[in-house]
Image: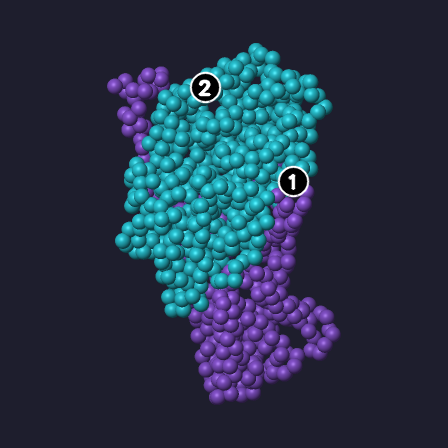
Amino acid sequence: MDFFKRHFFVALSAVLGLIIIAYVGARGNLQLVFGVVVPYMAALIFVEGLVYRVIQWARSPVPFRIPTTAAQGRSLPWIKRDLGEKLDNPADTPHLIGRMALEVFAFRSLFRNLRTELVKDPDNPEGARLIHWSYKWLWLGAIAFHYAFLVVILRHLRFFTEPTMGFVLMLDKVDGFFQFFTPAVYLSGVVLVAAVGYLLFRRITNPTVRYISLAADYFPLLLILGIGITGILMRYFFKTDIVAVKELAIGLATLHPKLPANLSSLFYIHLFLVCVLFAYFPFSKLMHAPGVFMSPTRNMVCNNRWVMHVNPWNYPVKFHSYAEYEDKFREPMIEAGIPVEKEQ
Amino acid sequence: MAKTPTPAELLPGLSYKPPEKGWMDVKPDFRPGTYCNPASPKWMEWINYPYPAARSIPEDEWALPQDWKEIVLQGMEDRLNRFRSLKLFFDICVRCGACADKCHFFLGTGDPKNMPVLRAELLRSVYRRYFKTIGRALGEIAGARNLTEDVIKEWFFYLYQCTICRRCSLFCPYGIDMAEMTLLGRELLASVGLNIDWAMASVAQCYDKGSHIGAPPQAFKDMIDFLAEENERVTGITTTPSYNRKGAEVLFVMPSGDYFADPGTFTMMGYMLLFEHIGLDYTLSTYAAEGGNFGWFISHEMGKRLNAKIYAEAKRLGVKWILGGECGHMWRVCNQYMSTWWGPVDFLEKPVSPITGTRFENAAVHKMVHISEFTADLIHHGKLNLDPQRNAHIKLTFHDSCNTARGMGILEEPRYIINNVLPEGNFVEMPPNTIREKAFCCGSSSGINANENMELRMQGGFPRANAVRFVHDKYGVNHLGCICALDRATLPTLLEYWVPEVGVTGISELVGNALIFPDEMERTTDLRDRDLVGFGELAEEAGEEEE
């Protein structure tokens, strides 16, 4: 099996294996394990792992101020910069916050994305030329996926509180605005699955992206696809006892876990995949989420020449001092009429 | 030396389709013309670098020290603890591939390991194997692999096919910067004695004598004096610089490329004419005779060892502030590293232009001003008497140097100068996706502008040259302007190869051409002795095309 197949099928088998484990567990009277123990463990691993990883990063200092300056920098007062430029090359903290907000909420850098291709051009002596054009599909796929996922997660809060929080109800309404099916179809769910599908499709069909992809790239996509599909199945096709789900969720949230009897296997599969996602999060590339906040090329003010940056481990180095230099070249320097410190 | 294929031979073989074999099983092909020679032990001994030895790549003689593996892994751990960037960039990449077709080396060679994401994986895979539980346990399927001699050779091959230009970091959704990983990876290679000769020779010479070109003080003075004579010959204006003069107001530091070889030398002539024009009280230093910093291409420490001379010399000479010439990586280093390395610069004053009174607030702590800022300010205040017609024979496009663009943000200043020293309509931009912060690299920066890797250099510079070709064909552009000495050293070769009709010029050279002095002689040529429009051959051939 080649590199791609090995990595893809390992990820696929892992997700299928997880589904089978949850199914067998639910069928084999292990509801307590899959309904209570695993969710608590996953939550614990998620929180502790996240904190641990962020602390691990934070323990290493940022020795140099190395922002990527993505526009004209602060310069002479008459060189005017528009807001976009001030955000892409922030000279102060408010603009830096703006830059980070754009990065986090709008995926600014990815929005810049281009596609470059080599095309035949008989007019060129070398027979070809490069063309560059703005390419927003990856940005669109990514942003659709992340926002849909966010809405889905927020919507699920309705299971955790009684009465359901106002904004969650609102979100529910907006999300289910298009009523072409009963129950109302949540747009977020559809977008989530479509976007994950696109990202997966792209990863498999784009030769260069497939070449660099590892099992760790397919696994989260397949896992989230599994979560999305089981969720959709439960809502629209194999109805689940919502009251029982809410009972379980509130029990878990209030640390008084209760195990309702009539939860379907499908629900346990869904829940288990979610738990795996949470537990997997801190040890995977999904850490890009907290990581982007700590990225030194993005989260630093571009003020290198007017605010000193201190490197905590800065140490003195041996350099060729002027005195050594003059000792070496004194004679020719005097001969050439270059001033010296010591005339011999 | 390997024969470099012609452009027409190079392009048909170019494809971005990756090979069938997985990347972990593909070994680099050390074909002559695609790699730099390992450093001669002599240079390494000069600067006390570890494990100097005679090495040869064709003979597969790498002379790694016995405990090379421990050294590299220990070095990696050490750097993970000292650089958050490294740890973070190793951990958070999602391999989305947005960086892939942003790298000029990938676009020029089609080698998938030149996609920044995969170049980073070359290092990251070793990190996973030795520093991550999952990598230790699962090996290849977790993207981890053993550190072997082959891996080291692969690092040597590909980390010197990255010019630290940071174009990838601009497009990365998390700002992952290959330049940072390349620099630290090169440090790891250096820790087991692997360096490239071109960079190492420059570093050793600069450390010992004062500049990359290894000119001792008297030779440095000779070269500058010669350029001053050239200025006098062409313009009739005496531009006598001073050397190591205490009490001058400004220390001027330029990259050695500006006084060493054409066309950089014309930029140097331009600087001197400008300073003469405004009566600047400045001095040059034979000791801090290098603004560029090849040391930084080898390690952060070596960068500091070379850079320290600039502040030390400014302190010794008692100048008020420092003015820096046109150079790309010099300014990335001076902007983002210099004051952090040195500490508080309390012996200098906040830079103030003695001509216009402008306070350079953006250099208040660091106390070093970029020549383009300085010149733009002079023009803005009407302090320069300029005749743009003297540049009428030049149809220009401007190449933003990677480091001043993405490591500083100097984009408008040079354009402002250009628009004031060229006749209207003589400046055209290249396509927007290839300039400013999205500029393509010259393909030969970061110490790889050697001769033995010429094929690689021409491939790496292809995206840049291709954009130049576009404006040449469409608008008749005949000059590529830049504010970088490495550009002036490498782009002429690149353009000679891809677009031979286009020459390379520094921006200060254009300023020098355009300056009007009250007591000058009649100007009939530019600083390069080429006829001005309306004079000599150009008068007779009026209306015809310049050859």
Chain assignment, label 2: B
Labelled disc at residue B226: 2
- The correct choice, above or below, for B451 with respect to A8 in the image is above
Marks 2, 1 in one chain: yes
* Residue B49: image location, x then y, percent: 31, 42
Q: Chain under label 1?
A: B
Along the viewing direction, whichever of A139 and A5 lies nearer the viewer: A5
B333 vs B539, left or right, is: left
Q: Who is closer to the viewer here, A206 or A146?
A: A206
Chain A tint as drawn: purple
The CA distance from mark 2 to mark 1 is 37 Å
Rendered cyan, the chain in question is B
Q: Residue at x 55, y 16 (%)?
A: B234
For disc 1, the marked residue is B470
| Residue A199 visible, this angle | no
Q: Are the residues tagged 2 and 1 within 8 Å (C-beta)?
A: no
* Kind of residue sitting beneath label 2: Phe
* Residue at x 59%, y 21% (from the top left corner): B530
Would you place residue B516 above or below residue B174 in this image?
above
Q: Residue at x 58, y 31 (%)?
A: B503
Residue B59 coordinates in the image, percent (x, y): 36, 48
Instruction: Classify B26 as above or below B341.
Output: below
Q: Residue furthest right?
A: A180
In which quadrant is the C terminus of chain A drawn?
top left
- What's the residue type where badge 1 is placed? Phe
SS type, badge 1: helix
Label 2 secondary element: helix
Residue B246 image-quadrant placement? top left
